[in-house]
Image (cartoon, helix red, strand yellow):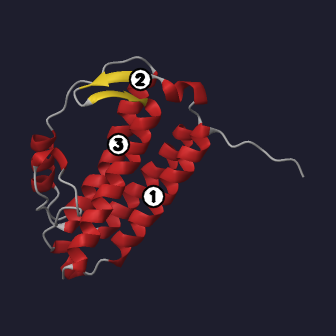
Amino acid sequence: MAKTKTSRSGRLADQFEASQESFMRVVESLTNDQWRMRGRNTPGQRINDEDEARPLGVIAHHVAVNQDVIMSRIQAVLHDKPTPPVDFKEINAKHAFEYADTTKAEVLSVMRDTGRQIAKDLRAIPDEKLDMARELPSGKMTVQQRIERVLIGHMTSHRGSIEATIASD
């Protein structure tokens, strides 16, 4: 049988799906008491110069709704559209207030709905476009790096925060 070459974007989509499945397993495992616990930083990480203190359910919802936001910013780069700077501290604080009562079912539903489309969109990116780069406040980053560090990395980092919190319980 001949070997088939997997595209880079296909491998990235596979990595995204694996990361999302892992995140969803952690979310599904949370008890009602854990869902309301205040989060802790992922060991060795401090994001946006702030400490994690949102309830775990809010963190999970934040990840779920921001996957689509992150992917839309990746799509903007692919289509040479602007990606204006964002005040993450302000957005995260507003989100935490507005979704303080989010449920596990809501989070998992959003993740399933957006995850399928994001994986499909990732697979559709021509490999040569993964090398497109854009200057950001944090430095130059390619589309592939945005997928790995921002789309997948955001989810992985917050999974680490949730796991660190429940491990300290």
Mark 2 and mark 3 lie on one chain; the one further toward the N terminus is 2
Count residues near mark 3 (Cα–Cα under 10 Å), then give few for <14, some for 14-19, many for 20+: some
Is 43 left or right of 17, judged from the image as shown? left
Residue 88 in the image: state x and y as whole percent: 16, 40
Front residue of this view, candidates 14 and 59: 14
* Disc 1: CA contacts within 10 A as few (<14), some (14-19) or many (>=20): some
* Residue ID at (44%, 31%): 143
* Amino acid, disc 3: Val
| Amino acid type at image mark 2 | Ala
The first of marks 3 and 1 along the sequence is: 1
Image point (40%, 32%), residue name: 74
Please tell me whether residue 57 is drawn above or below residue 9 in the rendered image: below
**Is residue 48 toward the left or the right of residue 148 in the image?**
left
Residue with the mark numbered 1: 19
The secondary structure type at the circle numbered 2 is: strand
* Viewer-nearest of discs 2 and 1: 2
Q: Residues within 10 Å of mark 2 (few under 14, many from 20)?
A: some
Image coords of residue 152 (percent x, y): 40, 49
**Alpha carbon of mark 3 to alpha carbon of mark 1: how far?**
12 Å
- The residue under label 2 is 133
Residue 119 visible in this rendered orientation of the protein: yes
> Which element carries disc 3, helix, strand or loop?
helix
